[in-house]
Image (spheres, grey):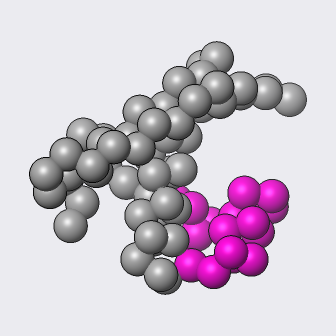
Amino acid sequence: MCIVEISKIEIVESGDLILIRVSGSHFLWKQVCRMVGVMVEAGRGKLSISEIEAIFTSPSEIVAKLTAPPSVAVS
């Protein structure tokens, strides 16, 4: 099993943008884009706390559908 240690997540508003910086030991393929995609949908009120917990604790196909594009503004 591969363990990724996330040491810091910074979220900063800059004008119309929300900048997210994630620091960690290393990252799995699309890990950060998928984390951000889930945060965006949660922020839009489209995911409940129990849905978010389920996404991060059990295998789920939903995460792939929510993957945020890298370095692109999401409206």
Q: Residue at x 80, y 61 (%)?
A: 58
Q: Quadrant of residue 54?
A: bottom right
Q: Residue lying furthest left in this view?
A: 15
Viewport quadrant of the N terminus: top right
On the question of residue 21 being in view, the answer is yes
- Who's the residue at 37% across and 54% down the image? 68
At x 71% / y 27%, what residue is drawn? 4
Left of 24 or right of it: where is 11? Answer: left
Where does the C terminus fall, quadrant-wise? bottom left
| Total labels drawn | 0
Type of secondary structure dominating the magenta stretch: helix
Chain part drawn in magenta: 47-65
Asked if 73 appears above or below 12 in the picture, the reply is: below
In this view, 62 is above or below 34: below
Quarter of the rendering containing residue 16 = bottom left
x and y, in percent, of residue 43 in the image: 44, 70
Q: Is residue 39 above or below residue 70?
A: below
Residue 52 belongs to magenta span: yes
- Please say whether residue 71 is one of the residues in the magenta stretch: no
Residue 63 point in image, percent of width and height: 57, 61
- Does residue 26 appear left or right of residue 30 in this picture? right
Q: Is residue 59 left or right of residue 31?
A: right
